[in-house]
Each structure stands twice: as C-alpha cells, then as structure tokens.
Image: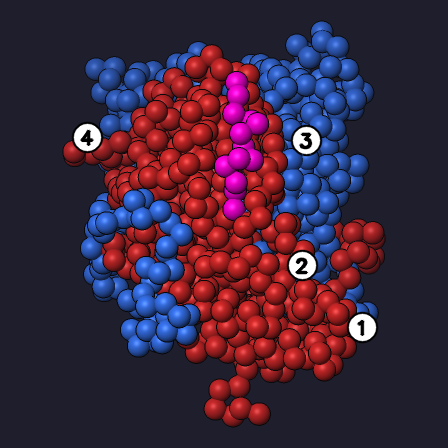
Chain colours: A red, B blue
Amino acid sequence: MNCKDPFPGIKGLIFDEPLIFNRSESGRNGCSVPDDDLVDFTYSIPDTFLLRDDIPGMPEVCELDMVRHYTRLSQWNYSVDLGMYPLGSCTMKYNPKVNEEIASLDGFAQLHPHTPIHLSQGALQVMYDLARYLTEISGLSAVTLQPSAGAQGELAGMLIIKSFHVNNGDSQRVNVLIPDSAHGTNPASCVLAGLKAVEIKSGPDGRLDPEAIVPYLNESLAGIMMTNPNTLGIFETHADKVADMIHGAGGLVYMDGANLNALMGIVKPADLGVDVQHINLHKTFSTPHGGGGPGSGPVAVSEKLKPFLPIPIIEFDGERYMYQWDRPLSIGRLHGFMGNFAVMLRAYAYIRALGPDGIRSVSEAAILNANYIKEKLRPYYNLPYNDICKHECVLNDEYQAKNSITTMDIAKRLMDYGFHPPTVYFPLIVHGAIMIEPTESESRRNLDQFINAMIRIAQEAEENPDLLKSAPHLPKLTRLDETLAARKLILRWTPDA
Amino acid sequence: MQYIPLTENECRQMLESLGVSSIDDLLSDIPAAKRLKQALNLPVAMSEQNLARFMKRLASFDTPHDSIPCFMGAGSYRHFVPAAVRAMAARSEFVTAYTPYQPEISQGSLQAMFEYQTMMTQLTGMQVSNASMYDGAMATAEAALLAVRAKRCQTVMVSRALNPSYRTVLDTYTSNLDVTITELPVNSKGQTDLTPLLSLDAKNIAGVMIQSPNMLGVIEDLESIGRQLKQLKILFVVVVTEAMSLAILKAPGHCGADIVCGEGQSLGLPVNFGGPYLGFFTVTDELMRRMPGRVVGLTQDTEGRCGFVNTLSTREQHIRRDKATSNICTNQALCAITSAMYMTAMGQRGLRNVALMNMKKAAYLKSKLETVSGVSIPFDGPAFNELTVVLPASLDSFQKALAEHGIIGGYDLRCSWPELGQAMLLCVTETNTREDIDRFTVVLSEWIQEVRG
C-alpha cells in the first residue's frame, strides 16, 4: 500500500436515496410563493374548462428534502472536479470557477434576449468579440455562434454547403465523403441537410488516403467532412492535399472541430484548405459539460460562404453593436434566440484569461500529455496505429483477449482505482478501442497515477481476470444491465410501480 | 498559466522519456509550411482579478430585466427562482460531469434525469419524455420531422400563431428535406382556425402543430382541436413556449396530443440572453421508438439493485449513423436537471400558485389597459401571461417614451403580424409588481395624449 500517494478510488460513505416521488407527502409545502400584491383585485377566469385541477405525481417536499435529495444524488456522480476524466474526443478539461461567476452576473444571466440593443451592448460585444477570436483561431472569415452543440454546428455547416451549391446551380452535388473513423453525428447531420453520406475507408496508417477519394471527384461531389486530428488522435497529414483535390472537383471541405484542442496556435484549419468548421466550446474552450449539455457549437466559414450564415449576425459600426437581419442567402435560423449565450460567455472568459501564448500552450501540453500516456502504456496495451499522436491516443484490448478480458472490463476496473474510463469501442475502425484524452489540465502526477492504474489492471488481467470481469467493485452500483433496460422499458416513475 | 499544471522541468523530463527534444518534434506530422510562425492575434492574457473586473464592466453595459420594469416575453419568461435551485444546480458534480456513458459512476445525473422525464410527463400529460433537446424551437422542428416519419407523408400544417423564430427554425430544418409546411390562419378570437384543413385530404397531412398559449398570447382550445384531428387521424403536435402555463392549463396530453414539445426555460432557468434553455420533448407510447434524443431508463445491477442507464440508443446517431432518428448528441442535460430541481422546490402547489398569479397579473394588466382610450386589445380569447395590444400611433415612438421612463416594453409584433398595425405583445409574470403595471399604464396614457396633441 502506497500511503503517500494512494489511488483515489476507495470506499466511502455513500447515502442511498429514493426517487424524489417517494419523499413526497401530500400537502407538504416546500416553496415560498411570491407575495400577491393584487389581493383586492378580483377577476374571473374566463374559461374554467381550460384549467386542470392538479398535477398528479408532482412531488411535494420541503426545501431541506430537496437539498438533501440532490446533494446525495450529486455524490454518485464522477466529475472533472473529482478526478481525471480521460474520455477521448470529449476534452474533459478543467472548467475554471471564475467563468461560472461571470456567467451568473446579473447583466448577463438576467438579460432578456429581446432587450433593445441600446440596453444590451455588453452581451452583444461579448458575442461579437468571441466570434472574432474564433475567426482568428480557425483562420476563417466569419463565425456564427448560434448552434447549440457540435452536431447542430455540423448541420449548420452542411446546410451552408448545400445552399452554396444550390446557389451555384449545382443542386446535383449531394455526396459528402466521410471517413469511417468519423463520429456518428457526421453522417446523421449530412442526411438532415438533404445530402448523402459516402463512407471512405481509412488507410493502413489510420489516415485518410488521398487515393481513396479519387473515384468520388465528380459532378456529384458536395464536399468532405474530416475530423482533424482524426478520432485516432492522428493528424491528417494529407489534409491540405485532400482539400486541393476536393476544391479541384468543385467540392467544399468541412472540418469537424471536436479535436481542435490539438491545433490552437499551432496550425489554422483555414491554412489546411478548410472552408467550414464547427468548434465545440464545451470541449476546447473549457465550458462545463453539465452531464451531457448544454454545449455550444459555433461554425466558422470562409469568405465565400459568409452570405449563407444563419441570421441574425452581429455587426459593429465603430460605436454600437447591432443585429443584421437582411441576408437573403442565409440558411435561416437554428435557435429561437442567439444560441447558448451563457456558454459563450465562459469560452470568451477562457480566451481572455489565456491570451495567445496560453492558448498555444494548451494545445502543446495536451499533445505532450497524450504522447506520454501512449508511450508509457504501449508495453502493456496494444497500439493499433503506432505513430506520434496529437491530443489523444487509441489503444485496444488485443493483449488481454487471451484471458477473455475485454475493453469494457478494463474500463469498469478503472473506476475502482478512482478514474473515469476512457472512451471505449470508438472509433469503430479499432476493435475494442480505448481512446484516451488526458487534456492539458492533468499534472504529471495525475498522469503517472492513471498510467500506474492501467498497468496494474494489465497485470490483474493476467493474474486475476475475474477481478476485472466483475468490476467495478467500489461504486454505488455494480455493472448495470443495459439489455434489460432496453427490453423492459421503464422511462418514468408511476405511483403504482 | 493557472490552467496548465506542467512545470518546465516536468515538460523536459516527459519529452526526454519520449525520446524527443522539444514539443516541435511531436508536431512533425503537421506540414512545416502550414505551421504558424507567429502568435495568434488575440488580446494578451488577463489575471483573474482583471478578468473579473473587465467582465463586470461589460455586464454593466446591459440592463437586467429585474433592475427596471420589464414587459418582455415572447419565448423567454421572467420567473422567480428559489435560491436552493441555483445552489443545487451549481454543484460541480452535476456541472463538470460528461454524458453518462459509464452509468455506474453517473447515477446522480441519471436518476435526476429519470425524475425530470417523469415530471415532464406529469406536466404535459404524456407517456414518454426524452432527456432534452437544445431549445423549444429546435424541439418543434424535430417534432415536425417525427410526424413526417411516423405518418410517411410530407405535409405538416402549422398555426400562423407559432412563434416566428420557431417557424424560421422549422423552415431551416426542413428546407432540404421532402417536407411541406403550410399555414393555418387565426380567427377573430386569436385562435387557430382549422377550417382550411377540412377541405384537404387528411391522408396527405402528417401533423398539425399548434402553439398554446400562442404567439398572440391566446390559449388555444386544445380539446376541440384534438377531437377533430383524432377523427381525421392526423398527428396533433402541441408546442408550448411558456412551460409555466402547463401548471394551470389542461394538460395537452389529456386533449389528444401525440407530441407535446417546446421550451422549458420558465422552469428554473434564467433568461440568459436567450440560452442555454431547455427543449422538452414528450410523446405517446406509440411514438416512443421514433423519438429523437437521449432517454434514461430503469434497470438493475448484477446484484439486483435498481439503477439507471441511457437506453433506446439504437435510434441514435452513434449506432445508426445516417439512419438515426436525429443527429443530436450533446443535449441540455444540466438545464433539464435544473428544471427538475425547480419543479421539486416549487412542488405541485407552488407551481400552480405561481401559474395562477401569472394569469391574475395578465388579467389586471388587461383591466388597466381597457381604461386607456385609444388602445385596443384585438383578441378576446383567454390569456395566460401575455396580451396583444394595438396602439393608436407608431410603436417606435412609444418604445422611445418607455425608454425615457426606464421601462422595457413588449415584443414588437409588426414584423410577423403587419396586418395588426402598431401591435405589441406584453408579458407579465409574478416578477412584475402592481406598481410596474400601473406605471406602464400611466406612461401609455400620457404618450397617447401627447401623440394625439
């Protein structure tokens, strides 16, 4: 036992907690309803048939019940603030606390989206400037902040590409080339924009082989969707050549910016021939993931695609920030208002805190950390694509297979050591993929601790495989039956259950 | 740099262990000609103290709605949120977690989401809720796509009184798909008129989408619409932009709705200059497997204990790729959980009382406006917390008068409803005091006197 620096995973005091509905007591009041300053005003509700009597099942608890309930639930969650969260392609970096304070300032949080522009200049400036910073980082010409997440950014990008071709009289251009290592959102977004996803097989080195796209360089080509670095964490070395080929055939290049954390200040996507890219503020720019959202997926475009951006855009005339609605070629809107503003605020603050050198250091440290993990784990886990990596690396369970140990077993066992598992079984082109993204936030001590846990698990796989198969042992619950959940669907609580 | 822990010494040692001499060696796969030679053109780094000061200054250029009388609604609603909700929603275990891909160590988010789903079905009277969409507008677009998928026909009819931003998002989402959107007009009460539908062949119509309370502030007669659509076998989609209304109005699910979706911002989220909000999406059991988005289900662990997991994932993009029911991945999980916290804090009676108070304030506003000569209230349909008013002179001039008195007025309806003239949609909630409303009325009367000379 290492007393100086043990693994964080250890059994603790965990409280059980029922569903909130089981804490409810009819007639209990938990809230302070605002005062009625119209006591003497009598009115008749015109159509009582429009009204309901009660909301059956809605909980009735006191404030302390509510606070204990959610405090206990929160303690069953793993989180970045609790420990290392090396989920590949998710960029689980530290979420600075000052950004939370900034987002809760009254001038932002209590600002109504329809507030007249002369009373919302601060918020408009934040959006205007954030768009400019993202323009600089991507090297592209203009940015929309409207998309609420990466997938909606992809949709925006695909709609822009579609509109560009249609506007050129090229509505037959529907094919979008997508490498087989891509995120599932890529083909799904493509189809939603009325385009067709064409899967391209990755080359033997895990990269996109320019030869592979040659058959598709024709009148039906709309463009390509590339993730760079790709989901293997490998830089697409031929990206600029591929872009030239696509452009030569009249297509456009979309970059999925999920992995932008590897490139900031090192290379601008526009210099690699990218025409459109989305950026995940909730990955690269440190905004928290909130257990699955909200995110924000701004889209940057080149000069010729600017007219197609969603409306409105924000302009500055040297004195005032204002909305510009008159954009006849715009794809329209993706959000009821301007997008996830409070997420943008955090990203804005992050960029201002780091400055140009800090931004570059982020990417460099992320790359160093990922390569360090990769090299340290290589003797113990198979590395299907042996190359320098960028911000993440992909291993698999090939060495452990002889003991019937799978990637899932390794992942679950990591929980016992106090780490969140890496992304598993993705990308699909690697059998049993273990995709590790440490981010720049982790210190060398944390990396070493994670590496030691992984090495220990590789040893356990040899010596005591059952320990892995029955993992996790320390969390509140053991392995959960996902098949049962899908077969016997229970998606809400009911009083008789 | 406070966010990057590596020391120079550690850096050097790590590079050594990799057998390279500098970070640049790890970048050798990026064509040298493309690598940046100079620093990004971004403002220089700021200390935390300066950053906080700077951001406070920017925030001071804005006017928060609670600092002056404000009558703005139209898709974003000002409601009181108890401190306990903010405190719980700010717990970093919820805030800094990812999507619960590993359920054993994500039970907090998962159980809270299961409770959210349950509460949304209670509020809407529907059977199934997903774990959230981006916002009300996008949820509405996805509802149209679901109707088209489920009915295998292309036409969706949409009330003219749908929020115009929602309509634009709907048009954007369907612009390149085989979907036709047609509009249903509004009658003199301000409610959607189904008459044009009756002359069409119902077999060709996938769904009808009705917002209630609608963009003119009028509550729709969902029961009657539901009855008619059921006979015609057309899917009934109810869009709710003001979720607080669900606490007092008859549940759409009990009026024959097949999909109830919309905006949940009213349930505990600040107005946030437009986002992040909460797209909610609820359906009947029949439509469950065609529903977009994540959903949490109950299951057991290996020892038979209850637990929660993401389920029905075979509908989703990470499995089905180009054949998925939607491209959504990241959603608005924390917003959904926050709204569950809000509903828990308010409870059944709290929600109902606040909703009633909204109705009462709107009734009071209406009674005051009726005393102002020259102002007309064009629709006499029932209202929740919004009201359309038509002014006798230019709305721009009235907005100017309001600004001079430090009041934020209502939503300008002229763009989407030019035929109404100088029309404005006013919103009052529990955050508006009687004094606010009285003052607004006084400013309005004085302005009318002035413009009438």
Q: Secondary structure at mark 3?
A: helix
Position of A256 compared to B356: left or right? left
Q: Which secondary structure, mark 1?
A: loop
Work out whether mark 1 precedes mark 3 in sequence or the reverse, and give the earlier one.
3
> Tag 4, which chain?
A
Give me the residue at 38% from left, 35% from top.
Answer: A273
Residue B401 on the magenta segment: no
Q: Using the numbered discs, state the Cα–Cα distance from disc 4 to disc 2 in whole angstroms.
A: 54 Å
What residue sits right under mark 2 in the picture? A432
Which residue in the structure is indicated by mark 3? B146
Crowd rating for badge 3 (residues with CA inside 10 Å; few <14, some 14–19, many 20+) = many
Real-space Cα separation, disc 1 to disc 4, in angstroms: 65 Å
* Residue B266 locus on image (x, y percent): 51, 45
The residue to which callout 1 is attached is B303
| Mark 4 and mark 3 residues within 8 Å of each other at the beta carbon | no
Which residue is more in the foreground, B107 or B343? Answer: B107
Q: Residue at x 56, y 27 (%)?
A: A216
Q: Secondary structure at mark 2?
A: loop
SS assignment at label 4: loop
Alpha carbons under labels 1 and 3: distance apart:
38 Å
Q: Is residue B96 shown left or right of residue B9?
A: right
Residue beneath disc 4: A317
Depth check, front residue: A71 or B3:
B3
Q: Residues within 10 Å of mark 4 (few under 14, many from 20)?
A: few
